[in-house]
Image (cartoon, coloured by chain):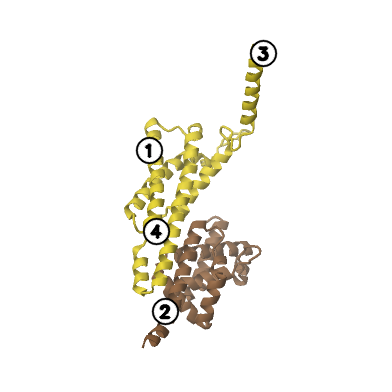
């Protein structure tokens, strides 16, 4: 009798586990297109919207701060500093989000589509870890000390993010339009040669 | 020489806009506002009768969109001091009393609907932020002579 009860409990336990697994959200099928699309969007967003050097220079330009200081209006200075702090925090939050999206792609899917050698994979893992830590530190620094407190760290983070983007671009290259050679016109008789 | 592709047509039309129209508008802020006014609020499509008759409505639309993106990018990378100067010149040319202009722009934020469609959310937010600060500086400059008089 005790054995039957134990088996019943065990069976019920398995049923509960099965129910929990079946009800999981955010489960992505292996090789699903959703992660690929997200990775492609993250890469585009980083390359065109968040990391262009000229935009970074503009966002963190000290010349703007000096100009606002020269105006000599404390209210305007306060507005400028709060706006730039908000923009800097938003920038780093966006970068972190897109980097996380690329990290999910690399940790789960990239090996299906791109054959990276072990050294590149290790370097990439290190870049992701250091970039995510740098983003967190930048968020804290911007929050407590303002947007102009860590220019070297911003440059470093942008550099590492650029390397991550370059590797991701290679891995996602197959999503681009196929490059075919010119169509040859050397068909013989009734057969077509392309 | 082969037939002209649509992309080449668009480039040609965009160059036409730059040479015939935009060359007469020296300030990038003015060009940005002008090009955004070419866009239909409901459809998001750009219209220009002359350009559409020379090329086609589709080519004219894409050419104007290209020019709009260019002006947006240029304005985005503009130093704050330059943006303030452009805004002051724009207010002068608008023939609107500066205080009315400033209160309207601060209240309605018309620049929000002037950005091109494909602009990144972050870059647009950065531009809006610069506009807010530039408006505050222009407003302060307007108030400064009065403040000086009060002190005197």
Position of the C terminus of chain A, as image quadrant, is top right
- Give the spatial CA distance, label 4 vs label 1: 27 Å
Q: Residue at x 40, y 34 (%)?
A: A121
Q: Is residue A36 left or right of residue A77?
A: right
Mark 1: which secondary structure? helix
Q: Secondary structure at mark 2?
A: helix
Name the subunit of mark 3. A
Residue receiving disc 4: A54
Q: Are marks 2 and 3 on the same chain?
A: no
Disc on the earlier residue, 3 or 4: 3
Q: Chain of mark 4?
A: A
Q: Is residue A89 above or below residue B84?
A: above
Closer to viewer: mark 3 or mark 1: 3
In whole angstroms, how far apart are the C-alphas of marks 3 and 1?
52 Å
Residue A4's tag is: 3
The one nearer the camera, A54 or A61, is: A61
On the image, numbered disc 2 is attached to which residue?
Answer: B141
Residue visible at 41% across and 67% down in the picture: A78
Distance (Cα) linking label 2 and label 1 = 50 Å
Mark yes or no: residue B110 visible. Answer: yes
Which chain shows up in brown?
Answer: B
Q: Secondary structure at mark 4?
A: helix
Q: Which residue is mark 1?
A: A126
Same chain assignment for discs 3 and 4: yes
């Amino acid at each position: 009798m005790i054995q039957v009860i134990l088996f019943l409990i065990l069976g019920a336990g398995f049923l509960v586990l099965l129910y929990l697994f079946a009800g999981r959200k955010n489960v992505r099928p292996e090789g699903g297109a959703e992660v690929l699309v997200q990775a492609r969007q993250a890469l585009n967003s980083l390359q065109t919207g968040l990391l262009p050097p000229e935009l970074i220079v503009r966002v963190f330009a000290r010349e703007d701060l000096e100009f606002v200081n020269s105006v000599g209006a404390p209210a305007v200075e306060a507005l400028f500093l709060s706006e730039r702090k908000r923009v800097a925090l938003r920038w780093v939050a966006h970068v972190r989000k897109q980097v996380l999206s690329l990290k999910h792609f690399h940790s789960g899917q990239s090996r299906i589509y791109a054959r990276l050698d072990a050294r590149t994979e290790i370097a990439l893992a290190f870049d992701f870890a250091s970039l995510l830590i740098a983003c967190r530190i930048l968020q804290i620094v911007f929050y407590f000390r303002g947007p102009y407190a860590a220019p070297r760290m911003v440059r470093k983070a942008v550099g590492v993010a650029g390397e991550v983007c370059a590797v991701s671009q290679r891995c996602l290259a197959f999503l681009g339009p196929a490059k075919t050679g010119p169509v040859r016109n050397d068909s013989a008789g009734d057969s077509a040669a392309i | 020489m082969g037939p002209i592709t649509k992309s080449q047509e668009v480039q040609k039309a965009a160059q036409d806009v730059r040479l015939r129209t935009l060359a007469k508008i020296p300030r990038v802020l003015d060009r940005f506002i002008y090009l955004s006014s070419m866009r239909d609020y409901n459809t998001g499509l750009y219209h220009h009768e002359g350009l559409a008759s020379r090329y086609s409505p589709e080519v004219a639309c894409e050419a104007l969109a290209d020019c709009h993106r260019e002006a947006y990018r240029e304005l985005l990378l503009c130093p704050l001091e330059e943006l303030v100067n452009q805004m002051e010149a724009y207010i002068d040319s608008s023939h609107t009393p500066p205080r009315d202009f400033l209160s309207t722009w601060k209240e309605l934020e018309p620049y929000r609907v002037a950005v091109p469609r494909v602009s990144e959310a972050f870059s647009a937010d950065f531009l809006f932020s610069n506009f807010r600060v530039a408006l505050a500086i222009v407003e302060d400059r307007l108030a400064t002579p009065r403040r000086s008089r009060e002190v005197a």
